[in-house]
């Protein structure tokens, strides 16, 4: 019965293949929708310090504006596989765009932190659907041979939002108000809704599969418990805290129940067959680690530029732009390369670019030239583009259309988890490395060290006075933290190059030469 249902949906999905001109229109239609969440997240991040002062909130309280969105987006992402089948892609896409922008308007009108956090959570519910639906639209409207190019354009749209977001957030916050940061979502959302309505195919709702409430609840518990452990781990001392141990055990137990449930249930929340696809499993792993790196860098590079290299906030924002440009350029190049080459060399190139850039960053000094920083970040961004487009394309090239809704939701979920875990792990590693480096530096920091007696030291470093000792301790703390950043970059380098052997298990045949399904061929001939 299940095979019959999947076969029926596969036929329906393949029937939406469009002419080349229509496919271009679809790409144009989804680009603004691809921009909106990235632009919102990075623009809000820039506005948080101003919002903290206006709302008289603590750092922990104001951080919930970002956390509430991310938690909701992570928990509700898997639901969009079921919703896409039930509602239809275009209708559901229009609903989430309108909902996302409506929440943005409500946030801009809010006067209390509690209201803002509540509406940000609601906005996260709608925002969770963007990535799965964008991927579903590409997969449903492009043949396998052209999906690489489509994903390249989609990645370009996302990165343009990430580039514009910090600049727009800074301008709106500095010259207008933090409320305008949220209001800027509305015109972009209106454009996205108009283009989606105009160009995106409707999709076929499926009314046979009921919603698996038990599967949704236990997966939600697993994600929430893991998110709590990651958010509070550094504050509570990780596994020295009973709360963190309890949250970790709860997450592991709920995940165990969920895995058993989807394999034994007749009506699972997610189709377990997606995990039987080798390329998709590799895509999950790389998608997780890619977001681990992307959002880990977002937490490391701006602080080191501002606190240790002396760049002001605006200059830091401009120095981050080359990374986005590198991703945009390489995404388009990767999409074109996938027409002729397999994903192996393109993925390997992406890994080498990311690993090479982190290795270069690990040898930087506080007085390094801005040109070298920009070049390193450009190479890093290029690596993200090559790896993201090639692995996203190959993850779905051999997947049945009936499994794509679940596949896109699972991939989006793993990427979101990679973001959360990446920030937590790298910040924890930074704190530990700082402590270790400080201990090593402090061993030589003593009045009995003959070196200090013969070197012309500044008066403020007088080791015989309390102010001198405090001044020297500040220098040691700063140097220890800078060394810790370099250790994090080396850790990332090692992690990336350890992934290189996984590239060898990918298919050798280029996606552009993958054998098309008979229905695709028939439909393509018809369009001609």
Image (cartoon, helix red, strand yellow):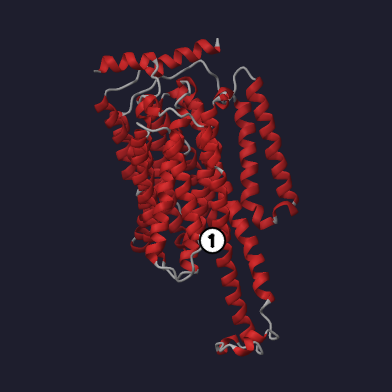
Residue 72 appears in the figure: no
Left or right: 494 with respect to 173? Answer: right
User: Dividing the picture into quarters, in which one does residue 340 lie?
Assistant: top left
Name above or below for residue 437 compared with residue 233: below
Judge by depth and name the residue closer to the eye, 447 or 108: 447
Q: How many marks?
A: 1
Q: Which residue is mark 1?
A: 57
**Residue 363: percent from the left, percent from the top?**
51, 63
Compared to residue 280, the image places residue 366 above or below, namely below
> Would you identify the image quadrant in which residue 331 lies?
top left
- In the displayed structure, 7 sits above or below 430; it is above
In the displayed structure image, the side of residue 328 where residue 438 appears, left or right: right
Q: Residue at horizontal 44%, vertical 52%?
A: 380
Which quarter of the rendering shows the N terminus? Answer: top right
On the question of residue 132 being in view, the answer is yes
For image coordinates 71% across by 39% down, the residue present is 250
In the rendered image, the quadrant that contains the C terminus is top left
Q: Nearer the viewer, residue 497 or 269?
A: 497
Q: Position of residue 143 (x, y in %)?
A: 36, 24
């Amino acid at each position: 019965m299940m095979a019959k249902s999947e076969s029926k949906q596969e036929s329906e999905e393949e029937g939406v293949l469009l002419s080349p001109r229509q496919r271009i229109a679809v790409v144009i239609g989804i680009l603004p929708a691809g921009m909106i969440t990235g632009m919102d997240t990075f623009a809000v991040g820039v506005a948080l310090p101003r919002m903290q002062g206006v709302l008289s909130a603590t750092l922990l309280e104001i951080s919930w504006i970002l956390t509430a969105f991310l938690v909701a987006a992570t928990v509700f992402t898997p639901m969009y596989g079921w919703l896409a089948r039930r509602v239809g892609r275009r209708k559901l896409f229009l609903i989430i765009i309108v909902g996302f922008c409506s929440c943005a308007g409500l946030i801009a009108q809010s006067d209390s932190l509690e209201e803002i956090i509540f509406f940000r959570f609601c906005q996260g519910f709608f925002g969770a659907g963007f990535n799965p639906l964008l991927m579903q639209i590409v997969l449903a409207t492009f043949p396998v041979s052209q999906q690489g190019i489509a994903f390249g354009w989609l990645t370009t749209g996302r990165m343009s939002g990430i580039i514009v977001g910090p600049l727009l957030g800074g301008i709106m916050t500095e010259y207008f108000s933090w409320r305008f940061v949220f209001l800027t979502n509305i015109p972009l959302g209106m454009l996205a809704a108009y283009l989606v309505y105009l160009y995106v195919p409707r999709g076929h709702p499926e009314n046979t599969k009921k919603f698996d409430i038990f599967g949704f609840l236990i997966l939600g518990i697993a994600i929430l418990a893991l998110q709590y452990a990651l958010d509070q781990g550094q504050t509570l001392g990780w596994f020295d805290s009973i709360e963190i141990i309890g949250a970790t055990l709860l997450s592991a137990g709920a995940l165990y129940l969920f895995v058993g449930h989807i394999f034994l249930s007749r009506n699972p929340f997610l189709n377990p067959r997606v995990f039987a696809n080798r390329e998709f499993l590799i895509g999950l792993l790389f998608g997780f680690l890619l977001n681990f790196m992307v959002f880990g860098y977002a937490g490391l590079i701006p602080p080191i530029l501002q606190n240790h290299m002396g760049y002001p906030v605006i200059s830091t924002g401009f120095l981050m732009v080359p990374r986005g440009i590198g991703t945009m350029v390489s995404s388009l190049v990767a999409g074109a390369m996938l027409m002729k080459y397999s994903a192996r060399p393109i993925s390997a190139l992406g890994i080498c670019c990311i690993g090479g850039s982190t290795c270069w960053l690990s040898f930087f000094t506080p007085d390094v030239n801005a040109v070298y920083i920009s070049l390193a970040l450009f190479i890093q961004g290029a690596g993200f583009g090559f790896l993201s487009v090639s692995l996203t394309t190959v993850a779905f090239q051999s997947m049945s259309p009936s499994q794509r809704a679940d596949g896109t939701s699972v991939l989006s979920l793993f990427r979101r988890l990679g973001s959360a875990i990446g920030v937590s792990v790298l910040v924890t590693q930074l704190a530990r490395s700082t402590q270790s480096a400080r201990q090593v530096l402090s061993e030589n920091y003593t009045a009995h060290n003959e070196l200090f007696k013969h070197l012309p030291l500044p008066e403020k470093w007088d080791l015989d006075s309390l102010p001198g000792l405090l001044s020297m301790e500040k220098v040691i703390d700063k140097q220890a933290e800078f060394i810790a950043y370099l250790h994090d970059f080396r850790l990332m380098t090692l992690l990336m190059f350890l992934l290189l052997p996984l590239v060898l298990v990918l298919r050798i045949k280029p996606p552009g030469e993958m054998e098309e399904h008979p229905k695709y061929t028939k439909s393509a001939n018809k369009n001609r």
